[in-house]
Image: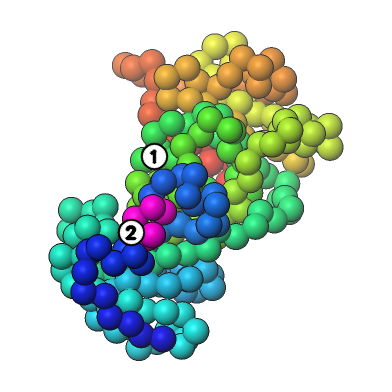
Amino acid sequence: MIYQINSRQNDKIKQLIKLYDSKERKIRKAFIVEGFHLFEMAKLSNSIIEIYTLNVIESLPENINQYIINEEILQKISKNKNPQGIVTVCKIKENEPIKSNKIIYLDDIADPGNMGTILRTALAFSYFDVIVSSNCVSIFNEKVIQASQGAIFKINVLNDDNNLIYKLKEEGYKIISTSLRDSIPLEKCPKFDKEILVFGNEARGVSNTILDNSDVKIRIEMDNIDSLNVGVASGIVLYHFK
């Protein structure tokens, strides 16, 4: 159905803006994406609940509500400096069981740009199962979504509830952690049938608990500087393992 909204004070607009809050997202099991590229990604994954747009989208099924808004309302609901004219509300899908023998574990990644970059890179190198620790930035943060370029619609992201990483270790997965200390060069890392690649927090790296339980600790050999941004490092490591 198609509806018209002309006021920034409309209740639908107020409810929409609340979805920028992580608690509200959890309650409603919904999140926001902006722009036509992410709209198309959401459509392909059957994730769309409703859209807010300057112009009617002809290709949408009738059961998806379209709210036609004006520029003033768009500026109110958008987090982008130059909004493209469409905001899409998507449903948060239930996590699926891990199906792959190669998994990424993100240990307290705090920066939204880094999180989105890692998810985008994971998809590029065919890593479809990602586990995030409880202190990671939300994957539904608007900056994460933009940086991921829609990867969240194709990757199975699980929360590390009840020490999932260690349960997987008991099932035969080898934990390979990035570390600048007591580590071997990336190129010398042995190959395993089942593996978990761990990338750590921007400030402190991988936690000591995970390092102590790691089967291998690896580092990227480099000159002139002692560390890399975790988003960049993940790209190098994932490319190597692919």
> Could you tell me the amino acid type at mark 1?
Pro
Question: How far across and how far down the image is residue 41, in percent?
Answer: 44, 68
> Badge 1: few (under 14), some or many (20 or more) residues near its Cα, within 10 Å?
many
Task: Check if mark 1's residue and mark 2's residue have beta carbons within 8 Å.
Answer: no
First in sequence, mark 1 or 2: give its number: 2
Q: Which residues are magenta?
A: 15-19
Choose mark 1 or mark 2, whichever is in front.
2
Residue 152 is left or right of residue 97, and the answer is left
Question: How far across and how far down the image is residue 149, in percent?
Answer: 39, 56
* Residue at numbered disc 2: 14
Count every numbered label the image shows and give the total: 2
**Quadrant placement of the N terminus:** bottom left
* Residue at numbered disc 1: 112
Note whether 46 is above or below 166 in the view shown: below
Residue found 43% across the figure and 25% down from its top: 202
Residue 79 is left or right of residue 2, and the answer is left
Question: How far across and how far down the image is residue 50, in percent?
Answer: 43, 72
Residue nearer the viewer, 181 or 23: 23
For residue 22, say whether it is visible: yes
> Badge 2: few (under 14), some or many (20 or more) residues near its Cα, within 10 Å?
few
Question: How far across and how far down the image is residue 155, in percent?
Answer: 57, 55
Specify the color scheme: rainbow
Q: Secondary structure at mark 2?
A: helix
